[in-house]
Image (tube, helix red, strand yellow):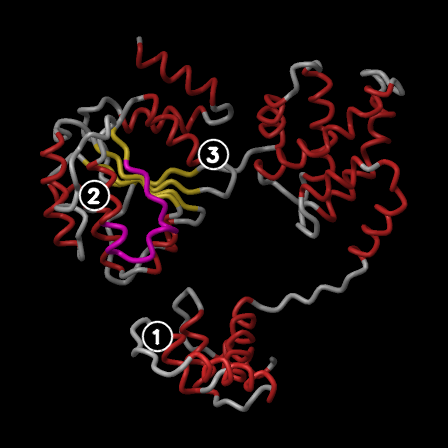
């Protein structure tokens, strides 16, 4: 019965995710139950992946290690973060973790992990390692992902690795071959499901039917250009006061749907062009809405924003442009100092450096070679970019 009560509680707290909740609860089971070695959970942003997994694991009171892969820029940092978080007790009275904090490779990780689990007494229950933003693992060596997916086999422990990502599993496959995890898809919310979820945010001082009407108006404007639940809830919250303004002023009643719509329609359309595109911040947008005495000024500001011509360069062209600027204003002898992780010590007076930097900008940009441009480009870009005809075509079009 407690198990069924937990499922019912989760379904009430997480609407429109009944199928995924039942599947995950059945896979996790009890603490001592053997779980799948690896789960791959994917879906678009705002589909409730992280919230659902976190809520289920918290409700089942499982031992969980949460890792944000964006913070782990190398395999060493990833291994050390897992070991450190496993060693943290709820009472936080465990001594120093220095013995487990130094882990350079997968071999050391598979050796230190069982020792840490056995010392803390977690060998009888399942340990879940949740890797959020798992698409960042593709930037590391292929054997890292393969090792994590086979961690249960390599350590002989009851460990389940959960990958949370926005992209499909086919993007993770590599030529070396990997263990195939159990794949779970979180589909996008339908319009009816978004309406049901957003209706839970209704203010207590107003009836739910009125807020449902407002949400329907918001979705009629934004749904075809934005399906992100987080963004839709944000847009609904910042425009709610404008929708309720006629009610507070006594100009309309709760049944005057047409009058309420006529009042909020222009503001929603303006929000579609400004807030969603982030041409003005949310705080600026709220200030512009609240300033009723400067309506003409607000219209002029929005008109100036809409009249701007935006030139959006391709992704790698932006990095090439930055690399060209750095190459034209910095001497070639400073490239090693700026773009190498291990550079020699810098000798010389500060006065000489300041004079050199000032004179370079006064003299203007200098010529540079293509090889130097590409070397700087590869050092500042985050991803591993293979030389291609498209990349060199972007160089020609700069």
* Residue 257 % position (x, y): 83, 22
For the C terminus, give its image quadrant: bottom right
Q: Which residue is mark 2?
A: 83
| Side (left or right) of 208 relative to 143 | right
Q: Residues within 10 Å of mark 3 (few under 14, many from 20)?
A: many
Q: CA distance from mark 3 to mark 1?
A: 40 Å
Is residue 331 found left or right of 33 in the rendered image? right
Does any portion of residue 154 appear in the rendered image?
A: no
Q: Is residue 19 left or right of residue 283?
A: left
Q: Nearer the viewer, mark 2 or mark 1?
A: 1
Mark 3 vs mark 1: in front: 1
The location of residue 105, given as percent across then percent down, is: 17, 57
Gap between marks 2 and 1, in whole Å?
A: 30 Å
Give the residue number, with chain letter if any, for mark 1.
Answer: 340
> Is residue 298 depicted above or below 304 in this figure?
above
Across and down, in percent, residue 354 comes to 49, 80
* Res. 273 visible in picture: yes
Residue under label 3: 48
Q: CB of mark 3 within 8 Å of CB of mark 2?
A: no
Q: Earlier in the sequence, mark 2 or mark 1?
A: 2
Residue 285's image quarter?
top right
Q: Residues within 10 Å of mark 2 (few under 14, many from 20)?
A: many
SS under mark 1: loop
The part of the chain drawn in magenta is 65-79
Nearest to the observer: residue 212 or residue 287: 287
Mark 2 residue element? helix
Residue 91 image point, x, y percent:
23, 26
Label at residue 309 = none
Asked if residue 76 is among those painted magenta in the image, a careful observer would answer yes
Q: Residue at x 43, y 36 (%)?
A: 49
Residue 274 as seen in the image, left or right of residue 6: right
């Amino acid at each position: 019965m407690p198990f069924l009560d937990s499922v019912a509680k989760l379904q009430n707290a997480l609407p429109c995710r009944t199928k995924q909740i039942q599947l995950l609860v059945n896979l996790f089971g009890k603490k001592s139950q053997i779980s799948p070695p690896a789960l791959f959970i994917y879906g678009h942003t705002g589909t409730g992946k992280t919230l659902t997994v976190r809520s289920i694991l918290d409700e089942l009171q499982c031992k969980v290690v949460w890792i944000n892969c964006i913070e782990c820029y190398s395999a060493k940092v990833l291994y050390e973060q897992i070991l450190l978080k496993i060693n943290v007790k709820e009472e936080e009275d465990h001594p120093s973790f220095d013995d487990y904090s130094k882990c350079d490779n997968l071999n050391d990780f598979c050796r230190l992990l069982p020792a840490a689990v056995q010392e803390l007494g977690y060998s009888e229950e399942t340990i879940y390692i949740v890797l959020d933003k798992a698409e960042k693992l593709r930037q590391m060596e292929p054997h890292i992902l393969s090792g994590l997916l086979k961690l249960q086999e390599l350590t002989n422990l009851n460990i389940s690795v959960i990958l949370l990502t926005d992209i499909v599993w086919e993007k993770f496959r590599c030529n070396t071959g990997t263990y195939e995890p159990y794949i779970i898809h979180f589909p996008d919310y339908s319009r009816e499901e978004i309406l049901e979820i957003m209706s839970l945010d209704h203010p207590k001082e107003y009836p739910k039917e009125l807020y449902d009407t407002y949400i329907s108006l918001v979705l009629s404007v934004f749904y075809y250009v934005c399906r992100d639940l987080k963004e839709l809830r944000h847009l609904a919250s910042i425009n709610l006061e404008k929708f309720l303004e006629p009610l507070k002023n006594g100009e309309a009643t709760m049944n005057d749907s047409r009058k309420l719509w006529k009042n909020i329609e222009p503001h929603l359309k303006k929000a579609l062009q400004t807030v969603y595109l982030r041409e003005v911040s949310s705080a600026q947008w709220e200030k512009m809405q609240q300033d009723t005495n400067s309506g003409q000024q607000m219209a002029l500001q929005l008109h100036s924003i809409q009249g701007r011509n935006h030139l959006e360069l391709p992704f790698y062209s932006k990095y090439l442009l930055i690399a060209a600027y750095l190459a034209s204003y910095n001497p070639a002898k400073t490239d090693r100092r700026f773009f190498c992780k291990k550079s020699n010590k810098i000798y010389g007076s500060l006065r000489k450096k300041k004079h050199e930097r000032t004179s370079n900008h006064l003299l203007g940009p200098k010529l540079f070679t293509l090889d130097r441009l590409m070397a700087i480009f590869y050092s500042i870009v985050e991803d591993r970019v293979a030389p291609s005809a498209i990349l060199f075509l972007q160089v020609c079009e700069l």
